[in-house]
Amino acid sequence: MWCRCIIFGLLILASVFHTEAIVGSSSHHQAQAVLDTDGNQLQAGREYYIVSAIRGGGGGGVTIGRREGSSSHSPTVRQHSYDMNLGSPVTFTPVSNSSQEILIWEELDGVQYLRLREMSSEENRIEEHTDLNIGFSGSKRVWQVEEANNGRSSSSSSQTTRYVTLRGQPGQPGASTVRNWFRIERISKSNPEYRIAYCPSVCESCHVECGNVGIMEENETRWLSVSQHREFPFVFIRKGKALQESVKAQNG
């Protein structure tokens, strides 16, 4: 009898999970997938290059650098000035990735049990306006917004800039990680061109000054920073695609 009660309780629990999943998916049914330069949906965990959408003088891809004279000594995200340099590959991890598996019923030798199901590629896609972590491949840290002196201020005036650094702890959405979450928003209807925005919703009680990721030149280096007054258009190139184009150019 107690076995039936346990199974019945688990069935109710599974039903609750299923209902919440349906409600969640219906509330985001209009969400659009972020596309790479081939028109394919960005997938969590895959490697992409974030490259300027402005060709001819707009610079290349993003990578890591260190600001001279900075007191924070934080590794900071910068953009290559040369158009053909794609930079370092990154991966995207949406906030929902921590719960990307749901309970499903299976039967083995006449006994029913619950197991976790992996999400499909469609469910694993990166969507616009979704909080996500951005990290360089192979790094244990993710992008983080950090205020620091911008190097342009005089001794009598203190000016700060919100730089994009590589000091964030991945996952764990909440007050302690609120500076680690970004969003991707499309800015062109005809082409897959996007801006990277900073306006996290992972902490309802936190005060966040929203802005967009732009490029700030400092000592002839292009640094990524967050501002309310500027933005920079980016495109996403799949790593494998970039290698194919490079080989084709060398052979061609």
Image (spheres, helix red, strand yellow):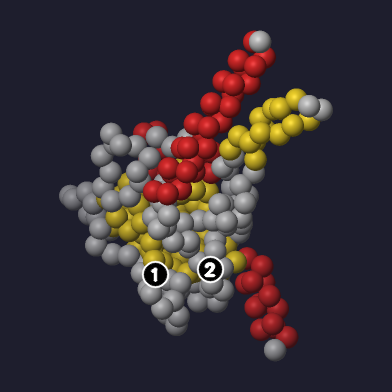
- Residue under label 1, please give it: 233
> Disc 1 marks which amino acid?
Pro
Determine the residue positioned at 40% across, 58% down.
30
Q: Residues within 10 Å of mark 1 (few under 14, many from 20)?
A: many
Residue at (23, 51) in percent of width and height: 159
Nearer to us in this view, 2 or 168: 2
Element under disc 2: loop
Q: Which of 69 and 11 lies nearest the eye of the viewer? A: 11
User: Which one is in front, 225 or 75?
Assistant: 225
Residue 38 place in picture, x, y as percent: 56, 74
Q: Which residue is mark 2?
A: 36
x, y percent for residue 123: 56, 52
For discs 2 and 1, the disc positioned in front in the rendered view? 2
Q: Residues within 10 Å of mark 2 (few under 14, many from 20)?
A: many
Q: Is residue 123 left or right of residue 30?
A: right
Q: Earlier in the sequence, mark 2 or mark 1?
A: 2
Is residue 225 visible to the viewer in this orientation of the structure?
Answer: no
Q: Give the residue at the far left of this rendering.
A: 156
Depicted 99 relative to depicted 198: above or below: above
Number of labelled discs? 2
- Which residue sits at x=49%, y=51%? 134
User: For the residues marked 2 and 1, what is the alpha-carbon distance in whole angstroms?
Assistant: 13 Å
Q: Is residue 162 left or right of residue 173?
A: left
- Which quarter of the figure has residue 55? bottom left
In the rendered image, the residue lying farthest to the right is 109
